[in-house]
Image: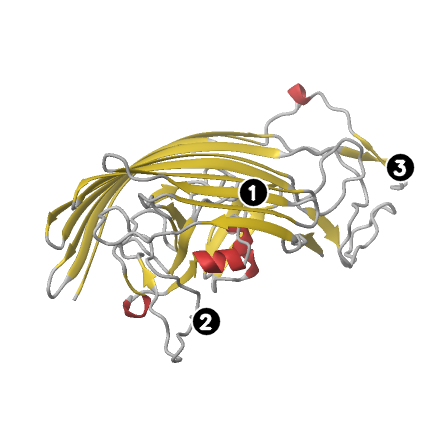
């Protein structure tokens, strides 16, 4: 029986912060649809008189009270994320959101396995041929592959987890549910916040968020983050990377243009770098197979691996563009367009159109989307160590990589077209 050693780094030991006023966008902006007030998961925060505070969500493409939203949903607000020291989606594997299972792929921590109520990719999510069973959306843009989901998050307003099929709201690969990530929009007023901290295992973090004053109806926001942690298990082979470490950094810029009430254009660009090393697997109980003497049972968590192995970081670089256009066609009727281009291990282009309406007796949304992805993958898997005859020592195996065949080589192009709609009285 094996288990994954994934010691969590300690709480930040020291931090300093500078915070100047913040602002919350209103529904009058047809693009700005993040939650307007803090929200929590199932144990909702109570007001001073003991009643539940109002929790605003945007899962149905419009801001509304969580208690009046007829879907199964859990929400983490920006405050919740800070309190839990959430730096990326992988930090949600602690069970903060009921029914959501987040687990890193063993040999590549930045590729995440996302399941809701047991539905999703259950095994090798790192294979590009496998579509996700849970849709991941950032500001309305679908992220089609597991690779890169572990990169650092930027100035998040809230994370909404919708449980169960969500095809009527999102239209793409949401059989298990959807994770809707909403970032904070430019405010148009000068605002600067910066945070730095250090922690155990050589971890450190620095992030900054800057809102610039509005100029000619254009508001600009800049975000940057650097976070790093050394390995949790030492690799005794000299010159090789330790187990379960990461190095993440990236930047994000967003410009919001509002020439008049009811009309807006929101452009965003982000770029991220993510380097991580595999988890360390240790045997906690004896099985039926014979074991090498140099690989003892390890029922307790370890700090140093039994055998040193050749190992380097898995590196992912991604960038993307998003353009969201919004216009109010009439009172209570909004047309929105979301166009996005993203590149990581794959190239993805997506286009989505939404028509959002509020009438006296009915609320409705209708939309259509198109998405095209192209990705390639070459995988070689072989033993990197060779045991001696009695299993008391291991040496690095010598290979001519050019002579080793690919275990998996993929060339995949995916084209998706869909329509969705929902009406409620």
> Is residue 343 among the parts visible in the rendering?
no
Q: Which part of the image, by quadrant, shows the C terminus?
A: bottom left
> For mark 2, does the 10 Å Cα neighbourhood hold few (<14), some (14 to 19), or many (20 or more) residues?
few
Camera-side residue: 329 or 260? Answer: 260
Q: Which part of the image, by quadrant, shows the N terminus?
A: bottom right
> Is residue 334 among the parts visible in the rendering?
yes
Compare marks 2 and 3 and give the one earlier in the sequence: 2
Colour style of the rendered protein structure = secondary structure
Q: Position of residue 103 (x, y in %)?
A: 56, 52
**Above or below 238: residue 187:** below
Element type where label 2 sits in the image: loop
Q: Position of residue 123 (x, y in %)?
A: 54, 48
Camera-side residue: 103 or 75? Answer: 75
Q: How far apart are labels 1 and 2 at the CA level?
A: 30 Å
- Are the residues flagged by discs 1 and 2 in contact, CB closer than 8 Å? no
Task: Name the residue tied to disc 2.
Answer: 43
Task: Name the residue tied to disc 3.
Answer: 389
Q: How far apart are labels 2 and 3 at the CA level?
A: 58 Å
Q: Is residue 316 left or right of residue 255?
A: right
Camera-side residue: 195 or 68? Answer: 195
Task: Name the residue tied to disc 1.
Answer: 206
Element type where label 3 sits in the image: loop
Camera-side residue: 423 or 128? Answer: 423
Q: Is residue 193 left or right of residue 67?
A: right
């Amino acid at each position: 029986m094996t288990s994954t050693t994934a010691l969590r780094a300690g709480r930040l030991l020291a931090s300093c912060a500078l915070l100047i006023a913040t602002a919350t966008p209103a529904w009058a902006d047809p693009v700005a649809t993040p939650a307007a007030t803090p929200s929590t998961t199932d144990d909702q925060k109570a007001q001073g008189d003991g009643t539940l505070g109002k929790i605003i969500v945007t899962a149905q493409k419009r801001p509304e009270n969580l208690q009046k939203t007829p879907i199964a949903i859990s929400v983490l607000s920006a405050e919740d994320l800070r309190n839990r020291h959430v730096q990326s989606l992988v930090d949600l594997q602690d069970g903060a959101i009921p029914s959501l299972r987040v687990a890193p792929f063993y040999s590549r921590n930045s590729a995440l396995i996302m399941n809701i109520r047991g539905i999703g990719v259950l095994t090798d999510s790192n294979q590009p041929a496998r579509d996700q069973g849970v849709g991941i959306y950032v500001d309305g843009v679908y992220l089609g592959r597991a690779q890169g989901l572990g990169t650092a998050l930027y100035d998040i307003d809230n994370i909404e987890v919708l449980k169960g099929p969500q095809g009527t709201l999102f239209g793409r690969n949401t059989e298990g549910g959807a994770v809707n990530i909403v970032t904070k929009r430019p405010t148009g007023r000068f605002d600067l916040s910066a945070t730095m901290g250090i922690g155990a295992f050589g971890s450190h973090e620095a992030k900054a968020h800057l809102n610039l004053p509005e100029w000619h109806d254009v508001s600009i926001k800049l975000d940057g983050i650097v976070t790093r942690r050394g390995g949790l298990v030492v690799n005794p082979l000299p010159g090789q990377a330790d187990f379960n470490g990461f190095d993440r950094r990236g930047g994000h810029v967003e410009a919001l243009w509002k020439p008049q009430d009811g009309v807006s254009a929101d452009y965003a660009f982000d770029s991220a770098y993510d380097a991580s090393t595999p988890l360390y697997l240790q045997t906690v109980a004896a099985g039926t197979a014979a074991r090498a003497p140099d690989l003892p049972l390890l029922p307790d968590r370890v700090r140093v691996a039994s055998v040193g192995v050749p190992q380097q970081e898995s590196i992912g670089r991604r960038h993307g563009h998003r353009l969201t256009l919004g216009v109010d066609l009439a009172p209570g009727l909004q047309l929105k367009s979301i166009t996005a281009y993203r590149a990581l291990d794959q190239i993805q282009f997506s286009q989505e159109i939404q028509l959002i309406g509020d009438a006296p007796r009915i609320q409705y949304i209708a939309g259509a989307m198109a998405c095209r992805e192209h990705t390639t993958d070459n995988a070689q898997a072989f033993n990197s160590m060779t045991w001696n005859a009695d299993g008391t020592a291991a040496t690095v195996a010598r290979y001519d990589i050019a002579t080793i065949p690919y275990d998996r080589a993929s060339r995949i192009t995916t084209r998706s077209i869909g329509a969705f709609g929902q009406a409620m009285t």
